Image (cartoon, rainbow, N blue to C red):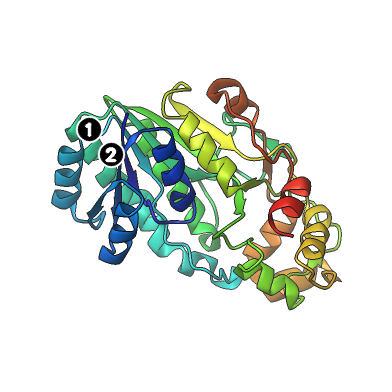
Amino acid sequence: MRVFVAGATGAIGRRLVPMLIQARHEVTGMTRSPDRASALESQGLRAVVCDVYDTDGVRQAMLVARPEVVIHELTDIPANVNPRRFAEQFRSTDRLRTEGTGNLLAAAQAAGARRFIAQSIFSAYQPTGGPIKREGDRLWSDPPEWAAPMRAVVEMEQLLGGAEHLDVLSLRYGYFYGPGTAYASDGSVAERVRKRAFPIGRGASGLWSLIHVDDAASATVAALDRGEPGAYNVVDDEPATAEAWLPVYADVIEAPKPLRVPGAVIRLGGGPYAAYMMYELRGASNEKAKRELGWSPTHPSWRQGFRKELG
């Protein structure tokens, strides 16, 4: 199968591309960096150097590649996310999710692709109602200004849903852990936890859905030819509060026990985004992805995944 991957050198792209090659797909990887293009070609795929905002360049790259499936994994998330600057730090990713998605969709349609798979996020569900969200639940279409990145996700999914002549799947990934991610043992989250700069809010009720980056990549491979168009939560089996997962994570990476502080301290120190994560975030169910993609995570829970992959 001919597969075009935009974002082939990102956190998930680096794990996805080898899986695609191993499965004997004909892969074209898009990157903005000539150096990264050389690294991609050394893996045995064709690389194109192109900026997603160059509409003519993207279109031409797609016409040459003639992909059957286009995979959109473009983000520009900073290595160290500051919760007080959440909206500011995600502006570049917001643009990739809106304007960038539109450009990729148009190019895929022009090239005659039949399927389009896009990276989305589970954390964009409306933080009301029950604790576990399924794909039919409402996304957060009217977030406050500090949560503007959620609005960009909604706009992206609206673009995806309105695409013609394409089967479009939106994969709502959980928070990645594993090699090359912020939650890796050498990542930015691990650094904060070691400095005791990631406290647990007392009475934490927000549910985090996590996923090993290789499990996210394997779900993406499964989506090449399985599943009806629509959204799929790609998360592990055990959504958990920070009270549950963070002490285990700290123990595995040999960090001090996280501090436990009042909710007011979370809001004061990390701002409204940190408070949302600690107290309002909803988890997600992976039942649909298991059922329709024929996929299940190798690491069903972060409990085993942390100890196997981060220790």
User: Is residue 6 shown left or right of residue 103?
Assistant: right
Say what secondary structure mark 2 lies in.
Answer: helix
Q: How far is mark 2 from mark 1, CA to CA?
A: 6 Å
- The residue lying toward the viewer, choosing from 199 and 190, is 190
Q: Relative to residue 144, is residue 131 depicted above or below?
A: above
Amino acid under disc 2: Leu
For residue 188, what is the image quadrant? bottom right
Q: Relative to residue 30, is residue 111 depicted above or below?
A: above
Classify 10 Å Cα crowding around label 2: few (below 14), some (14-19), many (20 and above).
Answer: many
User: Is residue 14 shown left or right of residue 131?
Assistant: left
Classify 10 Å Cα crowding around label 1: few (below 14), some (14-19), many (20 and above).
Answer: many
Asked whether residue 119 appears in the rendered view, the answer is yes
Quarter of the picture holding the C terminus: bottom right
User: Residue 120 location in percent, x, y?
Assistant: 48, 44
Q: Which mark is residue 38?
A: none
At 61% from the left and 51% from the top, the residue drawn is 175
- The residue wearing badge 1 is 109
User: Is residue 228 shown left or right of residue 297?
Assistant: left
- The residue wearing badge 2 is 105
User: Residue 91 location in percent, x, y?
Assistant: 41, 63
Say what secondary structure mark 1 lies in.
Answer: helix
Amino acid under disc 1: Gln
User: Residue 40 location in percent, x, y?
Assistant: 33, 54
Q: Are marks 2 and 1 in contact (CB under 8 Å)?
A: yes
User: Residue 5 location in percent, x, y?
Assistant: 34, 44
Quarter of the picture holding the N terminus: top left
